[in-house]
């Protein structure tokens, strides 16, 4: 009998966009399976392999490695159309997908009315002059709402057209009422492709049903009991990598609520979102950018002026090419926040850190490292819970010297500029989490390994 494998969870420790995709891809040299366990196509990873950029939104990053099986767990909300678009793009690039991708039959489906609700709600907030959440407008939140309300259409419903049709009619009755009565959908200027599903502000049954049945023909051969398959793979000795989307501070419970996503992004959700026991999660790697970025609304204590040339924030934005993979929106930029990372370490149970984009700091003469905040006249050393308190935080900084030498492509720790080494060691000291990996460029091979997450030692 084969010995059981060792499994690793990879999570972002900030507001997403930490560079998880590259590290997941790098770690799949050891893994035989890669699992997405939450989120939807609001996530995005950019991989650079042999100088070629590839963007992924739903399919796990391990798909770029021949022989690796990829799984989409039950915690993911699935847009069948977007998944098929992604598969098509990969196949055009010569990558085999359909025989290596497994989709949980329990995944809730994202359908056009979810997208319409998402867009209309943000439009209503803007019209009312209230703060928008800054969603991607892709229907993620409304799809999770249907799941929690126990009315979602799931992938397994695609197997039963009559059942699917009956559930769809019920959902359309509810959501079209909300769209037309409360969100004034008939008065909105809808863009394609959603405009094609609408008539007089309501989503039409035939358009949604016919498209879903067409998608079913392609999707169903890849559908299975992912929970059973993962547990069987583990017992057979497979090493599994669980790939988180977004970042810890976007977690629905532990993030900067209400400026968060609609799922749990923390490591513990790898168990519930994939259908494995928590005892099978052996190591948690926290991906942490060497500075901080955020897309969308919400508090950001260490945010800098990133629009003015000549400022540190502008340097981070331009040298770091800080634009979202999924949305194309510019990311807000700021100094590294160690107090934030302490919160992430606490809620994820981090085993080690991977610091990414260290090379972006090359050329800055001085660095500011946030070690805590002043909140209502008192010093706190841990990021508070919720947006209201965080909004009132004033960061407390330590000043550290920067470096002129290049760290790009360095693959050994002691070859980094001395001040870069000191910066990383200070992060370790403040957060209490060891740095086990460092990324020094987007390229797969430009990685410093101090301790391998799949090593039992």
Image: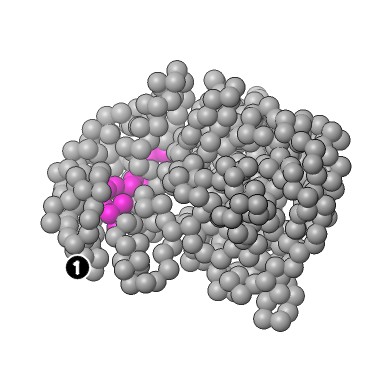
Residue 415's quadrant in the figure?
top right
Q: Toward the viewer: 159 or 415?
A: 415
Q: Give the residue displayed 54% in from the left and 20% down from the top.
A: 66
Residue 181's quadrant in the figure?
bottom left
User: Callout 1: helix, strand or loop?
Assistant: helix
Q: Give the residue displayed 65% in from the left and 48% down from the top.
A: 315
106 relative position to 209: left or right: right
Q: How many marks?
A: 1
Classify 133 as above or below 327: below
Percent position (x, y) of residue 99?
43, 22
Percent position (x, y) of residue 84?
35, 32
Q: Give the residue displayed 32% in from the left and 56% down from the top.
A: 119
Q: Toward the viewer: 221 or 417?
A: 417
Q: Is residue 342 visible?
A: no
Q: Toward the viewer: 45 or 126?
A: 126
Give the residue at mark 1.
181
Q: Is residue 407 visible?
A: yes
Classify 222 as above or below 425: above
Q: Quadrant of the N terminus?
A: top right
Percent position (x, y) of residue 246?
53, 49
Q: Quadrant of the C terminus?
A: top right
Percent position (x, y) of residue 344?
66, 57
Q: Give the residue displayed 60% in from the left and 59% down from the top.
A: 305
Please tell me whether residue 112 belongs to the stretch shown in magenta. yes
10 Å neighbourhood of mark 1: few (<14), some, or many (≥20)? few
359 relative position to 428: left or right: left
68 relative position to 337: left or right: left
User: What is the span of residues highlighted in magenta in the rendered image?
Assistant: 104-117
Please tell me whether residue 413 belongs to the stretch shown in magenta. no
Q: Toward the viewer: 290 or 211?
A: 290
Residue reaching furthest top?
94
């Amino acid at each position: 009998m084969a010995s059981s494998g060792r499994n690793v969870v990879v999570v972002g420790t900030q507001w997403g966009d930490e560079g998880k995709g590259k590290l997941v891809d790098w770690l799949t040299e050891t893994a035989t399976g890669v699992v997405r366990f939450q989120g939807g196509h609001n996530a995005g990873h950019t991989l650079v392999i042999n100088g070629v950029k590839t963007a992924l939104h739903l399919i796990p990053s391990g798909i770029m490695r021949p022989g690796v099986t990829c799984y989409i767990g039950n915690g993911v909300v699935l847009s069948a159309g977007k998944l098929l678009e992604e598969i098509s793009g990969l196949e055009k690039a010569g990558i085999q997908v359909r025989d290596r991708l497994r989709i949980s039959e329990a995944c809730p489906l994202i359908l056009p009315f979810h997208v319409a609700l998402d867009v209309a709600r943000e439009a209503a907030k803007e019209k009312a002059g209230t703060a928008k959440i800054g969603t991607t407008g892709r229907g993620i939140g409304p799809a999770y709402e249907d799941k929690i309300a126990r009315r979602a259409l799931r992938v397994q419903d695609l197997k039963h057209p009559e059942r699917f049709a009956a559930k769809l009619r019920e959902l359309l009755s509810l959501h079209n009422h909300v769209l037309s009565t409360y969100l004034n959908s008939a008065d909105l200027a809808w863009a394609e492709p959603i405009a094609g599903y609408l008539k007089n502000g309501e989503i039409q049954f035939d358009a949604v049903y016919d498209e879903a049945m067409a998608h079913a023909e392609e999707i169903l051969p890849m559908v299975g009991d992912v929970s059973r398959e993962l547990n069987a793979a583990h017992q057979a000795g497979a090493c599994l990598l669980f790939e988180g989307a977004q970042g810890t501070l976007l977690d629905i419970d532990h993030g900067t609520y209400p400026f968060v996503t609609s799922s749990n992004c923390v490591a513990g959700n790898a168990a519930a979102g994939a259908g494995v026991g928590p005892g099978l999660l052996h190591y948690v790697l926290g991906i942490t950018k060497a500075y901080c970025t955020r897309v969308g609304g919400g508090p950001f204590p260490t945010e800098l002026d990133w629009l003015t040339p000549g400022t540190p924030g502008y340097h981070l934005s331009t040298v770091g090419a800080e634009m979202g993979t999924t949305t194309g929106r510019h990311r807000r930029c700021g100094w590294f926040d160690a107090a934030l990372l302490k919160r992430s370490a606490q809620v994820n149970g981090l085993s080690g850190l991977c610091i990414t984009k260290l090379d972006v700091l090359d050329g800055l003469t001085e660095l500011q490292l946030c070690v805590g905040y002043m909140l209502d006249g008192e010093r706190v050393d841990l990021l508070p819970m919720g947006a209201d308190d965080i909004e009132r935080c004033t960061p407390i900084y330590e000043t550290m010297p920067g470096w002129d030498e290049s760290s790009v492509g360095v693959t050994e720790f002691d070859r980094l500029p001395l001040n870069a080494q000191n910066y990383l060691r200070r992060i370790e000291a403040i957060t209490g989490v060891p740095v086990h990996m460092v990324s020094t460029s987007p390229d797969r091979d430009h990685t410093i390994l101090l301790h391998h997450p799949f090593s039992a030692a």
